[in-house]
Image: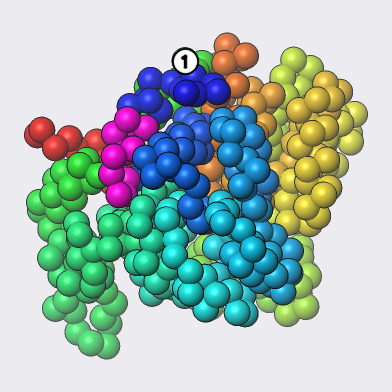
Amino acid sequence: MYLIKPWDHQLKAINTAKDRRYFALFFEMGTGKTMTAINILRHWFMQDGYIKNSLILCPPIVIDQWAEEFEKHSNISRFVVPVKGTGAKRLKIFKERLENNPASIFITNYETLSCKGIMPLLLRHNWFAQICDESHKLKNHAAKRTKLVTQLADQTFRKLILTGSPVLNSPMDIFSQIRIMDKGENFGKNFYVFRAQYFYDRNANMPKTKYFPDWVPNPNTVLELGKKLDRISQKALKSECIDLPPLVKTQIPVELNQYQKMAYNEMKDDLITYLDGKAAVANIALTKILRLQQIISGFVGVGDKGETHSFKDVPRLKALHDLLEELTPNHKVIVWAGFIQNYKKIKEICDALSIKYVELHGGIGAKEKQTAITQFREDDKIRVCIANQKSAGVGVNLVEASYAIYYSRGYSLEDDLQSESRNYRGGSERHSKITRIDLVSKGTVDEIILKALAKKQSIADKILDIKEKL
C-alpha cells in the first residue's frame, strides 16, 4: 500500500485521520508531514473509489517539493497540477483543468487566491479536500488571506492543516487555523467570542490615554485548549520520532566596542544617535529595536537616503572569523544573518580565509537560490552558506551542515524554528551532533529577543503537550 514505509508516528496519524473529515498534523519541521498528508489523502480517495478535485495551499517555495513528494509516495502524480506563474497564467490553468478534466490535485500558494478571477472560479466548483501547509500563516483571523481560505474551506468536504508551530505569538493563533479546518465545531466561528471565552485584557482598567490591549489566557485556557486540540490533532517532535543526533545549543558572548556601546546607549536612551554628522533616528518601538540590532551587528542606518555607517573592529565579526577558521576545515556551516550589510562583512571574512561560500537571501533570485542549494549540498569545497532566516528558512534542506551560527537574528519565532530545522531534520543523522551557536551581546536586545522566543515556545509546548486523558 505504501511506496515508502511510513515511520511509526506517520502511520499512527494516517490511521487516525483516514476516517475523519478533518485533522491537524502538528509535525515539527523534518518529521515528514507532507508524506503523511499525501497518504491520508490517498486513503480518502480510496474510500470514495476515485480521485476528486482537491487543493493544496502552501508557501511558494515548496510547490515543486509537494509535486515531487507525490511522485515518491503515490501512483497518482499524473493528477497533480502545480499552479504557478502570473495571475493570468494561474487562472488559465485552473479554468482549463476544472472544465476539461474529471479531477485534479492542485498545488499552489496562498496568494493565488487573491489573483483576479480565481476565487469566483474556484467557488463555482465542488472541492473534495483542502490541505493547508504551514497553516500558522493563517493565524491572523482578520487577514484577507485567512478570509479567502476560510470561504473556500467552508464548501470543502475534507480538510487537513499542517504546521510544526501552530502557536507562535499567543494561544489565540490557533483560532483561525482550527476554524478553517472544522467550520467552527470546536472553538466556534467568531474570533471575538472565542477571545472573550478564553482570554482577558490585562489592561482593561488602564486610563484611555495610556491604554493598549494585552490579552492573556484565563487560568484554565491552556488546559482547555490543549484537551480539545488533542482530540483533533497529532503532535510529532523530531526528538521523539527520528533517530537524530543531539542538537547542542550554545551561546557565545561577544562584546560591543566602545563606539558601538556609545551608539547603543544613546539610541536606547534617547531614540537618536549621531554618526558621521548624520542623525540615526528611531521614532517607534520596532524601528528602535531594528536600529539596536543593527548597532550590535556592526553598522547602523543613518540619514534619510538609505546610507549606513559601519563600525570598525567589531568584536562580533572577529568572533565569527575565529569560528569559521576553526570549523570549516571539517564542517559545513550555515551563517544566519538579517541585514544586507551583514552579508557583505561575512563574505569579506570568507574571502580573507579563502573559504568558498554560497548565498541564500533576498538579494538572490529563485534560480540562483536553487543553484546555491545544490552547490552547498553537493560540492564539498563549498563550506559556508550565508543565509537569511526569512528567505532560506522554509522548504530548504541543508543537512550537510553540522553547524549553524546565528550572527544576527529577528524576533519571529516562526523564522527561528524554520531556520533551525534546515540542518536539523531527517538526514542530519550523518553527523555525530548538530550545533547551534548564537552570538550574543550581554545586556542588549540580543538577550531580550532570545528570552522572548523561548517564552513563546514554552506557551506553545504547554498547549500541545496536554493529553485528553488528563
Q: Position of residue 172 (x, y in %)?
A: 28, 60
User: Quarter of the image containing the C terminus?
Assistant: top left
Compared to residue 34, the image places residue 363 above or below, namely below
Amino acid marked by disc 1: Asp
Q: Residue at x 54, y 63 (%)?
A: 110
Compared to residue 289, the image places residue 52 above or below, namely above
| Pointer 1 local density, CA inside 10 Å: few below 14, some 14–19, many at least 20 | few
Numbered-mark total: 1
Q: Secondary structure at mark 1?
A: loop
Q: Position of residue 290 (x, y in %)?
A: 57, 63
Taking the image as drawn, is residue 62 in sight?
no
- The residue to which callout 1 is attached is 243
- The image quadrant of residue 211 is bottom left
- The image quadrant of residue 375 is top right
Observer-nearest of 382 and 304: 382
Outermost top residue:
432
The answer to whether 313 appears left or right of 119 in the picture is right
The answer to whether 227 appears left or right of 72 in the picture is left
Residue 22 within the segment the image draws in magenta: yes
Q: Residue at x 61, y 14 (%)?
A: 431
| Colour setting | rainbow
Q: Position of residue 278 (x, y in %)?
A: 74, 76
The answer to whether 68 appears left or right of 289 in the picture is right
